[in-house]
Image (spheres, rainbow, N blue to C red):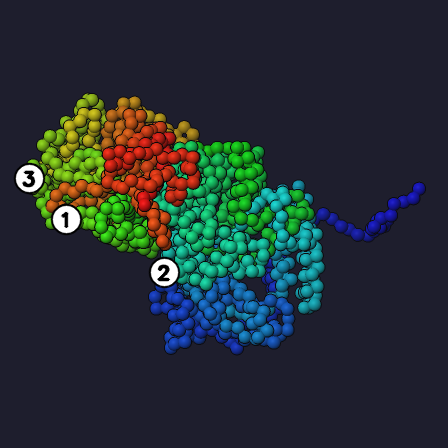
Amino acid sequence: MSKRPHSVAYPQLSEEVEHNLLPGISLKRLDLFLEGPYNDFNLTSVLDRIRLDDVETVRMTIWSAPTIEKVPFEEAVQNLQGPDIQVLKKGDLIGGSWSQHWVKVEIMIPVSFRESDEPVVFEFDPSCEALIFDRNGHPLHGITGGPNSTITAYPGYVEDRRIEHIIPREAVQAGKYECYIEVACNGIFGIGINGYRHHEPDMNMKYHLASADLVQIRSEAHALQVDFQILKQFARSPEGEKSSLSRQALKAANEIMNVFSRDSEERIDESIRKGRTIAMRVIGASVTDMDDDETKIWAIGHCHIDTGWLWRYAHTQQKIARSWSTQIDLMDRYPEHQFTASSAQQYVWLEQLYPTLFQKVKRAVLDQKFHPIGGSWLEHDCVLPSGESLIRQYLYGQRWFEEKFGVRSNIAWLPDTFGYASQLPQILRLAGIDYFFTQKLSWNNINIFPHSTFNWSGLDGSRVLAHMTPTDTYNAQANFSELQKGIIQNKNLESTDQCLLLFGNGDGGGGPISLMLEKLRRLNSSCKKNQEIPKVKIASAEKFFEHLCETTDGGKTLSDWKGELYFELHRGIFTSQAKIKNGNQTMEKLLRDVEYFATIASFSAPNYEYPKDQLDDIWHDVMLNHFHDVLPGTSIKMVNDDAIEIYEKRTRQAQHILDQALRALFPYELGEGGQLAIFDGTRIPRQQVVEVPHLLNHRAEGEDTQVSHEDSTTTLAYCRIDNNGIGSLLSPDSCAQPSIVQDGSTLTLSNSIIKLTISNGRITSLYDSVLGRELVTSGVGGIKTAGLMIYDDYPLSYDAWDAEIYHLKMGREILFDEVEVLRVEPLRSTIRTISRFGKSEVVLDISIDAMERDESQRPSIRIDAKVNWHETHKFLKFALPLDIHSSTATYGTQFGIIERPTHRNTSIDQAKFEVPAHMFADLSESGYGVSLISNYKYGYAVEGNTMRISLLRSATAPDVDQDRGYHEFTFNILPHLGRLVESGVYKRALTLTNPLRIYRTKSIPKLPITFDLQQGNQSQGIILETIKRGENDFIFDSKDRTIILRLYESLGGRSKASLRISGIPTPKAIKWLNVLEEPELFSHDPVQWETKNDSVEITMDFRCFEIKTLGIYFD
């Protein structure tokens, strides 16, 4: 019988003694090859062939800017030729915290470097961030000096150091090279004091030049270094001895160490070649082409740059240039590389400050290598801006991307935002966005969010296909463990086993580095040899989502999540930095009013031009401060000061524009005169008390008005507002007037409907006189009466960001130390209370105003607070325990309302101990309820029968002085009949939280164009929010004249309404639009309208919480 021949003979006898590797020793040994105590003898010691740092080879001069402000290239080069320069040498001090410097580098390249094909690099480590320019001022790439950043939970994980600048081959051959380097003395994560990233900046940091070396590298040694890193990652797979991949990699890595020799240059090169051959048994040959077959992990280069956080906006501008120029550089070296970046604002800065780099980015966008994403002006906060502000983020963002690049994004990109409002899906779909990406909910500190890929539905039922990468990061390092997490932690494997991998250093910028791309090449080639490695491919996020949509049958096979994506962390952001929140809401309301009156003026006032450019500039700054670390109040003091300065500047500018619009509308009425004209942007008809500045106070001629002294700056008057937002003074004689009764130390503030009693330093009673019903009763946590509460506030990790559940167990009542009658007058009666505690003082003026006599309505109790706040790690709230029983409370949100539990049955309920709200929180039972209403206090805690509104915090990081100082704000207690949706509270909250604009006038003006919204009996929830000019009216050579209206249904009911517009010419067309002001989405849904008696009447139907945009077009 013949024997089959063998390719390898199997010996009969052997003296070999081979054995399995001992995992404990062989694994630990791997740590010694690339680092550790043997760096002079391991692979690290042979990465360079030659290293030179003498002054004959590298010559440097430095010019230091006189301020911490950025200096343009041209100015820097001129100064580097002047008298204020110094010679810079390795080891020298560059500068201190936030300082700016420019370095001119002149390199003489030795002949030996020119004779070799090995790459030549200039290693420049200023211990901080820098940007290299060529001689013509073109940015080349960023430098990140100093050690790699540290993450406490994952020591040694992040590799964001990048100090090498590859000298172009033609310069090597020429023997001489010159460049310029802009050095910014801050780390990639700012300069947190004592090394704590999230703390205030250390203003005494010093940065020295750690390296300025010319190096001829040993390229194969660098390649083996990456090979070994990947083998080490495989060897340390959690599967360990059960994994074939792990054991093969462990054996290969040990063999590489065994063959490594540094006895001579020849032996070094030979052993490195052997090592690479060994590595290829596991890794395979590194490849650059990445096909789609069986891809599980879709990788995209990414660089999250916080627009303002631990550094100012000006520093961000530099970070953008450093990070994005690095990506352009990598694209030239790695043809497979693709990169994505959000935020139109960041591209705007790039175009303004680095125009040649912007052109490179633009070319890369056209080549589909650089992918603008997100569609928004920047990565905005989602819970604090108004609904209209969120719309503007996408209106301005999408239009800018289309104008500059010819592209729009269909992916909302908010990886680091602190929670996601329930109306966001509808806004996104109306902005042409189908997909949504984040990963922030992986930070939840109570419940694990149950989905990775799912359909997210908003209040109205609109939905987006959402993906939260199971890798739980937007700063992946392209490691094997991240690929494993992408599969193992995927919570929707029954529907899809694919995920996004965002690789690149972020938060402080940086982005992908060459090491990450080298690792991805090896991971891609390795998966062809071993099925334990998920298939990875570099591709755009858009291709990933399109593939996801296709493979899940348009999302039909995915799970659904309805309502808000509540973030179970960072609950302190609803309260931190009160002045920034006040600045934002002030601008939102002022811009609404400006657009309304400017629109009318532009159609009816001769020679008045709608101030589009000015309004755009203002909106850009307002949206800039929407950034998710600025508006939430989690930035350093320098950023907060910049934001407040922006608000102050833009408020003055917008007020001036409003004055101009009104004077254009009423050129003969406004100015000197004996009457007062009142303008209201909400256009909600009502009667109310109004505060009139003394400078404007005039008793209206011929009218029986009663003006009541209040204080040194304002007087009180009574007015009527019509449904077009025009108000006039009115006699209050027929009103229900307030009064105060004092009985010893007990004071009772009341009118014929409600009574509020203060006794023993607290509000002890709130009594409905019509129903004979007491509202105040004992509440949760031992709270027996209403009033101020102070809580200890020591969060676990992130000071300005977080409030933890246990703080509610660490509170005490604050008594009114002084109580006095401030005024008893027909228009307003007020009790003043003064509370002193710690280093602080709170003055509350508690008032009831005159109101129409209507027993179906309840008066609001107005509370004006004046606070000198100087506490540390304290949380000030106002608590109101009520004799009302309900398992849910209702909160205002953007364009609607939302219900949340008042019980703590489950851990999901427990997590919502502090929640955000716009305008109000309401606790109602059948027949009766009470709302707490505020204009810019967003944090509420309704637990059981007890309502709390959060007023002030006093964290110390990253702003050590957070909120310390003087504050004024107003909130209201509003009892009402019925549950919230039937009570009229939503509109009353609008009137209580929006300011009136008051002017002197010769006569009460009438608007030339009016908007009369009439609603049916079915619902009174439709709100006409915005009246503005169309965006396309101001495109070059446009002949369009358009009025844009934004309306929404606020209460969750189907509604019908008619809108009568008078004073306009007959429109040529009226169309439903998306929020980008385009009609295509609604081409099947024509607007029902007709002209009638010189007016246009539009009939409208709304579904629950629907947002509608109407375009009225004129010749």
- The 10 Å Cα crowd at callout 1, few under 14, some 14 to 19, many 20 or more, is few
Task: Quickly name the residue at label 3.
Answer: 702
Q: From mark 3 to mark 1, how far is it between C-alphas?
A: 20 Å
Nearest to viewer (mark 3 / mark 1): 1
Viewer can see residue 579: no
Q: Residue at x 19, y 22 (%)?
A: 772
Q: Position of residue 1095 (x, y in %)?
A: 26, 36
> Can you tell which quarter of the image residue 75 is in?
bottom left
- The 10 Å Cα crowd at callout 2, few under 14, some 14 to 19, many 20 or more, is few
Task: Quickly name the residue at label 2.
Answer: 203
Q: Secondary structure at mark 1?
A: loop
Q: Amino acid at mark 1?
A: Tyr
Q: Amino acid at mark 2?
A: Met
Circles 1, 2 touching at the beta carbon (< 8 Å) = no
- The outermost residue toward the right is 1
> 529 or 851, which is in the foreground?
851
Q: From mark 1 to mark 2, how far is it between C-alphas?
A: 56 Å
Q: Secondary structure at mark 2?
A: loop
Count of marks, rendered view: 3
Quadrant for the C terminus, please.
top left
> 135 or 976, which is in the foreground?
135
Q: Position of residue 603 (x, y in %)?
A: 26, 46
Nearest to viewer (mark 1 / mark 2): 1
Q: Earlier in the sequence, mark 2 or mark 3?
A: 2
Q: Position of residue 562 (x, y in %)?
A: 44, 33
Q: Secondary structure at mark 3?
A: loop
Q: Earlier in the sequence, mark 3 or mark 1?
A: 1
> Can you tell which quarter of the image residue 680 is in?
top left
Task: Quickly name the residue at label 1.
Answer: 668
Circles 2, 3 touching at the beta carbon (< 8 Å) = no
- Residue 182 lies left or right of residue 846; in this view the side is right
